Image: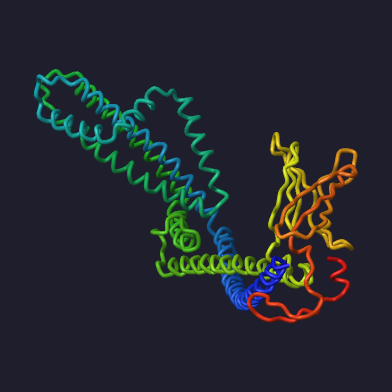
């Protein structure tokens, strides 16, 4: 009897504690829901601003594409054609200077030759891949070279559908054009310096280079004249002007490199909006996680305190979900009060679900239903009857029907409280008026 009184007292105290916790969680949830609504509205507002900004940029980019894509593509192609010629010029000069460096007669100690060899040697050492490219150019026949250049053009044409990519490709081509021209200027200067060699020396490598230089300059003059004619026919000045108009407008919307933006202020505004949106989303998701957690906690507490049958005096509250087991040799059975039940095979620890708690039976037994389905049989289930005792134990499990189990548990919750009078529960005098049918069930 005393054990039951203690169990009831524990249940009542736990109900007070959990009721207070439930009220606190509800208040916390209500506050969080307000914060959630504010955070969601703020996030949605910023996302709409961002979408509007992106739509505006897309519309602007479409207008720019209509106006500028065709001339920018044409300008890129003119630069590509010019670069093919200039790369070949640079490769030819490198090949000539390499032949002088490798083949000149050191014993002649020609100052002009020694100076050129020294300066070119430093250049080649700093840029070793240039000699490799020049040698590849020499080893390549005209057909293979033409096919390689066509493939480079085809690869570049993939950018021509996008004004952003095409502007970027032109930017790269112009930078390379400046670099190649600078290289040619330096290399050509060294070759011309060789013309001051001492003609009293019979240095075949130097003489051959000087003769080859004359042929190169004749061919270069002719090819650059062809380039000029092509540029004039294409009206390259107008094409370049269109590109220079388009580039800052494109960079302002979709810069390939943020440092190239025409307007640092606009860049800062764009970055600030993206950061604001990211921060608003992060704050919203954090609050959403808190809201979800609190909603689940309130739901679980409310279900426990307001919906679950915990006994007429909350005697099952302190034992809720506590598990008790019984080893029968082949199997161990586990019953968790008002929660779930399982059968565990001892040899391999395989678990079979015997069901979850659904309701009290007519005699206050626990009914666990909807367990794992038996082979050619029903879903597993177990009914747990109680016997009065001071200790909670699972003492017996049987299987009277296939996959339908009967168990017996002992515990103070199966005992009876006095029908009338007063008793001391948890240190306080309390009157218990217990309905007759409750005692009959217990």
Describe residue 192's horizontal placement relative to residue 89 as left or right. left
Please tell me in which quadrant of the rendered image residue 311 appears.
bottom right
The quarter of the image holding the C terminus is bottom right
Q: Is residue 229 left or right of residue 412?
A: left
Q: Is residue 31 visible?
A: yes
When the figure is inspected, residue 290 is found, relative to residue 334, above or below; the finding is below
Q: Is residue 106 above or below residue 17?
A: above
Residue drawn 76% across and 64% down?
A: 413
Residue 26 position, x and y percent, is: 65, 76
Instruction: Return the residue nearer the eye: 13 or 97.
Output: 13
Residue 360 in the image: x percent, y percent? 84, 62
23 left or right, relative to 401: left
Q: Is residue 95 left or right of residue 413?
A: left
**Percent from the top left, x then y, of residue 429?**
68, 81
Residue drawn at (47%, 49%), measured in percent from left and top? 75
Residue at image coords 79%, 68%:
416
Q: Position of residue 80 (x, y in %)?
A: 45, 42
The image quadrant that residue 303 belongs to is bottom right
């Amino acid at each position: 009897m005393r054990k039951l009184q203690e169990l009831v007292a524990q249940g009542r105290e736990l109900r007070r504690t959990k009721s207070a916790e439930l009220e606190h969680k509800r208040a916390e949830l209500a506050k969080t829901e307000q914060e959630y609504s504010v955070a969601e509205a703020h996030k949605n507002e910023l996302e709409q601003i961002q979408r509007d900004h992106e739509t505006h940029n897309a519309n602007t980019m479409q207008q720019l594409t209509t106006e500028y894509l065709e001339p920018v593509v044409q300008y890129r192609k003119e630069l590509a054609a010019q670069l093919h010629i200039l790369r070949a010029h640079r490769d030819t000069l490198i090949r000539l200077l390499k032949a002088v460096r490798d083949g000149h007669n050191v014993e002649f100690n020609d100052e002009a030759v020694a100076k050129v060899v020294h300066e070119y040697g430093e250049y080649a050492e700093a840029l070793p891949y240039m000699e490799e490219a020049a040698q590849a150019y020499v080893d390549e026949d005209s057909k293979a070279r033409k096919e390689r250049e066509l493939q480079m053009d085809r690869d570049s044409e993939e950018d021509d559908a996008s004004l952003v990519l095409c502007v970027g490709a032109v930017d790269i081509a112009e930078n390379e054009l400046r670099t190649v021209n600078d290289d040619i200027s330096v290399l050509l200067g060294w070759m011309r310096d060789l013309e001051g060699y001492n003609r009293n020396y019979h240095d075949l490598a130097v003489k051959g280079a000087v003769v080859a230089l004359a042929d190169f300059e004749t061919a270069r003059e002719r090819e650059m004249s062809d380039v000029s004619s092509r540029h004039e026919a294409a009206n390259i000045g107008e094409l370049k002007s269109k590109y220079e108009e388009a580039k800052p407008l494109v960079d302002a919307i979709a810069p390939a490199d943020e440092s190239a933006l025409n307007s640092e202020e606009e860049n800062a505004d764009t970055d600030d909006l993206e950061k604001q949106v990211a921060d608003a989303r992060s704050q919203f998701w954090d609050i959403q996680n808190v809201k979800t957690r609190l909603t689940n906690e309130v739901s679980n507490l409310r279900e426990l305190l307001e919906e679950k049958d915990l006994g007429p005096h909350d005697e099952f509250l302190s034992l809720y979900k506590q598990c008790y087991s019984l080893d029968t040799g082949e199997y161990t059975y586990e019953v968790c009060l008002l929660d779930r039940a399982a059968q565990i095979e001892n040899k391999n620890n395989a678990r079979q679900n015997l069901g979850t708690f659904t309701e009290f039976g007519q005699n206050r037994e626990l009914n666990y239903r909807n367990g794992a389905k038996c082979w050619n049989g029903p879903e597993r289930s177990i009914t747990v009857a109680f016997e009065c005792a001071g200790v909670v134990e699972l003492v017996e499990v049987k299987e009277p029907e296939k996959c339908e189990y009967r168990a017996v548990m002992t515990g103070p919750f199966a005992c009876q409280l006095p029908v009338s009078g007063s008793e001391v529960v948890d240190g306080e005098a309390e009157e218990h008026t217990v309905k007759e049918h409750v005692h009959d069930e217990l």
